[in-house]
Image: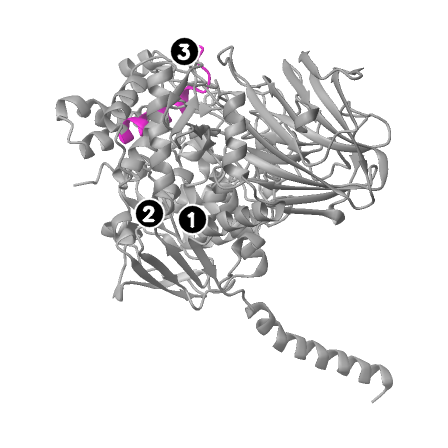
Amino acid sequence: MGPHTSFRRQLLIAAGMFALLTPAVHAQMVGKVSDPVEWVNPLMGTASKPEMSNGNTYPTIAVPWGMNFWTPQTGKMGNGWAYTYDADKIRGFKQTHQPSPWMNDYGQFSLMPVVGAKRFTQDARASWFSHKSETAKPYYYSVYLADADVTTEIAPTERAAQFRITFPKSDSAYIVVDAFDKGSYVKVLPEQRKVVGYSTRYARGPLPKNFRNYFVMVFDKPFTSADTWQGDALAAGKLEMDGAHSGAILGFSTNKGEQVHVRVASSFISQEQAELNLQRELASDSFDQTRAKAKAAWNQVLERVQPEGGSIDQMRTFYSSLYRMVLFPNKLYELDAKGQPVHWSPYNGETLPGYMFAGTGFWDTFRALYPFLNLVYPSINREMQAGLANDFREGGWLPEWSSPGYADVMVGNNSASVVADAWIKGVRSDDIETLWQALKHGANNEGPMSAVGRAGVGYYNELGYVPYDVKINENAARTLEYAYDDFAIYQLGKALNKPESEIAIYKQRSQNYRKLFDPETGLMRGRNKDGSFQSPFNPFKWGDAFTEGNSWHYTWSVFHDVHGLMQLMGGKQAFVDKLDMVFSLPPVFDDSYYGQVIHEIREMQVANMGQYAHGNQPIQHMIYLYNYAGAPWKAQYWLRETMNRMYKPTPDGYCGDEDNGQTSAWYVFSSMGFYPVTPAVNQYVLGAPLFRKVTLNLENGRKVVINAAANSEQHRYVDRLRMNGKDYSRNWISHEALLRGAVLDFSMSRTPNKQRGTADADAPYSISTAQ
């Protein structure tokens, strides 16, 4: 045996040993974590740009549902991409309320330390930084600013924050306050070591003329100099500035390592309310105490869902997604001197009692985010429902995109789903009669803009669809969403015991999806006013009759009557074949409606999942539809594929816009093993768990325990399900069963069980088969 043979033998032995070790290495799983907030990566999704969204997120330093968020600002003022992972410089630390870069921001101002010259414009004050010297947690942010040799730290509360800024030795240390352009005001009060002011900049409107974000900042060190500035001009020694773009620059003399603390709060109501928010939320707390309280607030919220038996990346992805789910909609209300909720109204400009929230688009979040709140965090959604009633009272309509008032974005009046799902799942609102009237009003009237109320409602109510040829864009998408929204209204009406004479019309209209089904292609298709289908028709054409998608995506938007859609397609097998085609088709597209490849198209193309465009909302529920056709194992396969391929706990970790918790909610629900395909129905459609165990700690004190001990990458199929110790064959579980507390035991297998869940009786709810 020669030396080369001996070496080869050693390699073979080593390879064999590695093969033996590999399953054990892969089997190493993370158990229940005691400090879930430390598993969150706020930078997940920040490696994004207009041409390609990997989340379009920014590191949100806040507390759950807080009124104010903070973020390091790498982009220029007014750029919706406030923080991007590949940026090299930070321009400031911004208070933000931005729900997405496409919606941009409102109520914003920033702080920025500099050393040396009085550099205050956004480019002059910018400093190089590195992710190697950056710490991003939901409750704490720290970064080293290389140009100034300064470390900046932030710890948040709901309406305030503390900054701790560590300076070098310098007699020329400064903190720049930028109240942003579009109209702002600052005033320096040196004897109180204080700066007050307001910003009026907003991106979506119109808003009442008195919109202001008032702020107050209190420093723990006297100023050696105090100046204001306007635009790019310094007003040396001037302590007050009012104009298009106002700011201040405050000087200090510092020793090496000296820390300057800044306590900041704001209010949409008044300067006095900003001061009250500062005193109430920060009191005499130190920076470390504020940080500790914020961390405790996060853990209290995140501990409501406890996965075990996942990989490190899966656990990080789970908690990073859950973090995104409890940010929006964020509080727009404040607490008055008596501790009662009050809010500035973005509809009439008045300060009024009660709750209000902002910063979400129901076209995205009705699908899974709000159902998750109803299951896991119902008390906060009770506040949100009260806020919706105030939206209607003060503005005359329910918002479909609030940022912070009405925004003319997206289609459908999916507020119907948000209200109905809450009530049907036990989130009882004292304002339900007001909300009922709001839903009917929105369903039967054109709104003040196309995204509020129903554009094309006259055509829809007369013909059963919004025609393709009457110059109402995205008409087929509107029709399909209106039909589902009518179903949601009908469901709520039944739950409220409204008379049949009042609600029957909504049940009838819920079948309007049938008007757009084209038997020739087996797909949804735009339809002209005279009844003919649009021609020519390209099912791969994005936009036009559809919204940010094509016919292959929107055809499945019949959440409430999947059985009816299946029958139109020719029955179970034809339906399954059509579902299969979504994945087997190439990712071709027609972008002629937009005149360019929009980012949603590009994200589908690069995902390598055919026509399945998980990066946008219309098709996200589609995989679960296999359960309606007796092929649940196909759902189990593709759900695992999507979780594996489309989500990572990294800056490029999402496969499209995260969208205020919706894309995250899909992952969190799916990883638990079920999903709310049809909001306003008390069912969750089953998939297959990602983890070996998940415990849901419900608000009512009960627990849902989901066991899948044999779960692994190879064992992704459900062989058997036992619920509370009894065999369970259905492809859905009820909301009530979960609220009572439940134990779900999934037996996982390498191979599909093609007998379980195949009977007609195992299928989830469809209105056409409901008793």
Question: Is residue 247 depicted above or below 31 in this figure?
Answer: above
Q: Residue at x 79, y 46 (%)?
A: 257
Observer-nearest of 44 and 410: 44
Q: In the picture, which quadrant includes the C terminus?
A: top left
Q: CA distance from mark 3 to mark 1?
A: 35 Å
Read off the residue under disc 2: 684
Hey, what amino acid is under mark 1?
Phe
Q: Position of residue 564 (x, y in %)?
A: 28, 36
| Residue 517 visible in the snapshot | no
The residue segment tinted magenta is 470-488
Hey, what amino acid is under mark 2?
Tyr
Crowd tier of the residue under label 3, counting other residues whose Cα lies within 10 Å: few below 14, some 14–19, many 20 or above: some
Q: Position of residue 574 (x, y in %)?
A: 36, 42
Q: CA distance from mark 2 to mark 3?
A: 35 Å
Badge count: 3
Q: Image check: 273 left or right of 485?
A: right
Observer-nearest of 336 and 509: 336
Q: Image check: 564 left or right of 620?
A: left
Q: Residue at x 47, y 51 (%)?
A: 302
Crowd tier of the residue under label 1, counting other residues whose Cα lies within 10 Å: few below 14, some 14–19, many 20 or above: many
Quarter-of-image position of residue 185: top right
Q: Are marks 2 and 1 in contact (CB under 8 Å)?
A: yes
Q: Residue at x 45, y 48 (%)?
A: 301
Q: Position of residue 233 (x, y in %)?
A: 79, 14
SS assignment at label 1? helix
| Residue 445 visible in the snapshot | yes
Observer-nearest of 642 and 322: 322
Read off the residue under disc 1: 669
Quarter-of-image position of residue 260: top right
Read off the residue under disc 3: 448
SS assignment at label 2? strand
